[in-house]
Image (cartoon, rainbow, N blue to C red):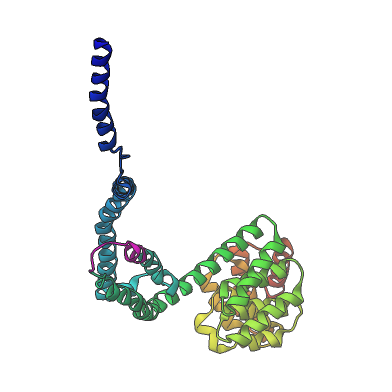
Amino acid sequence: MSVINSMLKNIEQRQPTTSLNEQGTVVVDPVYDSHGVIKKLLIIAIALLVVVLSYIYLPTASDDAAQLPERMDLVTKAQSSKEAEQNNTPVLINAPVVSNSDVIKPVAKVEPIIEEVAAVKTDTKEPFVAEKPMVAAITVEPNTVPSANKQSSFQVKKVTQQRTEQQQIAELLRQAKQALEFGLYQEGIDDLSQILNRDKGNIAARSLLAATYFQQQDILSAQSILEHGIAFDSQVLEWRVQLSKIYITRKQYSVVQQLLSDDFDSQGDAQYWALKGTAAQQLGDHTRALVCFEQLTQLQPQQGKWWLAMATSKDAQGDYLSAKRYYLAAIEVGNLNPAVLKHAKQRLQTLGGVS
């Protein structure tokens, strides 16, 4: 019993302590600071975002900042080149013609650069004030340069056109001569006609064209070409001589005398004196004929036909002694065809008894 009692006492002594402990202990759940956690997460997210943005945009900004001086140099060079062109305007006198579009082209290249520089966003508050006057200067200057350039280059261009026209005519004349040498008459005629359309007073082209028509037996065309030439310039003796040949073949000797008037005697050559003397002799004007044939005996003394012509005119005038002397001279000089030589000998025999 004693043991049981002691155990009960022990139990009773322990129960109040246990109940006391059970009543005095409060179990509290842990309280977490959610605002602090959210704030920390936001800070970490912002930091990560800043790092990412810095990684993306800082190289681009550095490249733009590196290219900015180069673009500014381009703008400065463009402005300096425009100022140099404006200061050196006297040099433009010998320069080729520059159109408005050619002068304005550099402006079209500079303006995009200025727009790109202005489009770069920086944190600084300094505006690009310097570029605005440059744009105004570059766009205004071309309006003044072309005016002086046009005036100065007009005279140079005009001289070049005149020289080119002469060269073209000379080339056409060369082609026409070459074509005629190879028997390409139509090509030669076309080239010569083209020359006369450009230059009516071209003596060589008109003379060659008339001679070509005459050779092709197109007498009317040759006559028309020469008559138009004489109407344009009546002092060209070469055209008068060629036209006289046509009228000689038609036996229109009076027209030949009109064409080869005494006003052209100072310019006369052997052909001129032969045509004029023949026309005068056929018209019975032996005095004029003797003057012409005497000129020919001096120019071409080795030609017996001129001595024979002198003898014929003297014989027609009744000056038989002079005629006999000229017949004899014609036979001695020679260069006569057999029929003419036979006539001269017969006439000399007829006049043999004349003293």
Answer yes or no: is residue 301 visible: no
**Image x and y of residue 139, in percent:** 35, 76
Residue at the image point whose x is 74% and y is 64% from the top? 339
The relative height of residue 54 versus residue 21 in the rendered view (above or below) is: below
Q: Would residue 243 be counted in the magenta stretch?
A: no
Residue at the image point whose x is 71% and y is 84% from the top? 253
Classify residue 83 as left or right of residue 309. Answer: left
Q: Would residue 116 be counted in the magenta stretch?
A: yes
**Image x and y of residue 17, in percent:** 23, 29
Classify residue 125 as left or right of residue 298. Answer: left
| Rendered image quadrant of residue 215 | bottom right
| Rendered image quadrant of residue 106 | bottom left
Q: Farthest residue in the front direction?
A: 1
Which quarter shows the N terminus? top left
Q: Nearer the viewer, residue 13 or 223?
A: 13
**Image x and y of residue 54, in percent:** 29, 48
**Image x and y of residue 163, in percent:** 46, 71
What range is drawn magenta here? 113-125
Q: Nearer the viewer, residue 244 or 221?
A: 221
Residue at the image point whose x is 24% and y is 72% from the top? 130
Q: Nearer the viewer, residue 247 or 61?
A: 61
Which quarter shows the C terminus? bottom right
Classify residue 346 as left or right of residue 30. Answer: right
Q: Nearer the viewer, residue 252 or 169?
A: 169
Callout count: 0
Answer yes or no: is residue 348 visible: yes
